[in-house]
């Protein structure tokens, strides 16, 4: 169990106390009231995908700005904190939230990797799990009859 909220930027974790939406940015603040390193996330067109998984209170955002890709993973230790902040984030950046399963971080990494290679893939929800199976490599949901992942080609 987590005992703090975490903001993980490109795999580097930092604790945060509060998330504030200021205009078109989310600002992450530590327990001393200071803004975290790179703790300002613009909520504009640079956000390529915003993946979330309620079960693990995780929102992972892939940004694509001027040829630079970053992955922001936000984790909450309390259900209440998650609910409040995720609602603010969703409002501030409506329209691009995509529901995912537990493998959302791996999926986010694969989206960022594809962007690096100039491929802009369509981000899809992983909502209906009936009759679907999850790719062990990228977390993508695939029809149960498929032997290979439609997203990354890995054997399922
Ligand atoms: Zn896959």
Image (cartoon, rainbow, N blue to C red):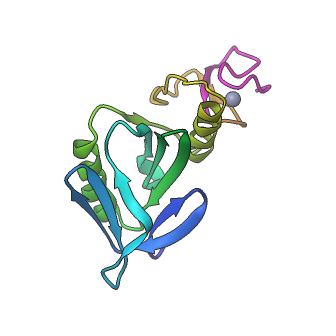
Residue 114, compared with residue 22, is above or below; it is above
Q: Residue furthest bottom?
A: 32
Residue 114, compared with residue 145, is above or below; it is below
Q: Does the image show residue 89?
A: yes
On the image, the x and y values in percent for residue 138 come to 66, 35
* Quarter in which the C terminus is drawn: top right
Q: Residue furthest right?
A: 155
Residue at 40%, 64% in the rendered image: 39
Front residue of this view, candidates 107 and 129: 107
Front residue of this view, candidates 27 and 123: 27
Highlighted magenta segment, given as a residue range: 139-156
Residue 107, compared with residue 14, is above or below; it is above
On the image, the x and y values in percent for residue 12 come to 59, 65
Residue 85, compared with residue 66, is above or below; it is below
* Picture quadrant where residue 134 is located: top right
Q: Is 99 left or right of 153, judged from the image as shown?
A: left
Say whether residue 15 is magenta.
Answer: no
Q: Residue furthest front?
A: 66
Front residue of this view, candidates 141 and 27: 27
Say whether residue 148 is magenta.
Answer: yes
Q: Main secondary structure of the magenta part?
A: loop
Residue at 35%, 36% in the rendered image: 45
Q: Is 36 left or right of 137, judged from the image as shown?
A: left
Q: Is 148 left or right of 116, judged from the image as shown?
A: right
Q: Is 35 left or right of 100, judged from the image as shown?
A: left
């Amino acid at each position: 169990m987590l005992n703090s909220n975490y903001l993980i930027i490109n795999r580097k974790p930092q604790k945060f106390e509060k998330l504030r939406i200021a205009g078109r940015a989310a600002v992450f603040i530590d327990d001393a009231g200071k803004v975290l390193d790179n703790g300002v996330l613009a909520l504009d067109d640079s956000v390529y995908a915003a993946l979330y998984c309620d079960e693990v209170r995780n929102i992972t955002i892939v940004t694509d700005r001027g040829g630079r890709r970053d992955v922001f993973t936000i984790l909450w230790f309390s259900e209440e904190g998650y609910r409040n902040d995720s609602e603010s984030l969703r409002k501030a950046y409506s329209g691009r939230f995509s529901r995912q399963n537990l493998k959302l971080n791996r999926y986010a990494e694969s989206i960022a990797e594809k962007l690096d290679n100039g491929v802009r893939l369509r981000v899809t929800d992983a909502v209906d799990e009936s009759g679907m199976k999850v790719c062990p490599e990228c977390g993508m949901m695939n029809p149960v009859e498929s032997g290979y992942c439609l997203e990354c080609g890995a054997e399922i």
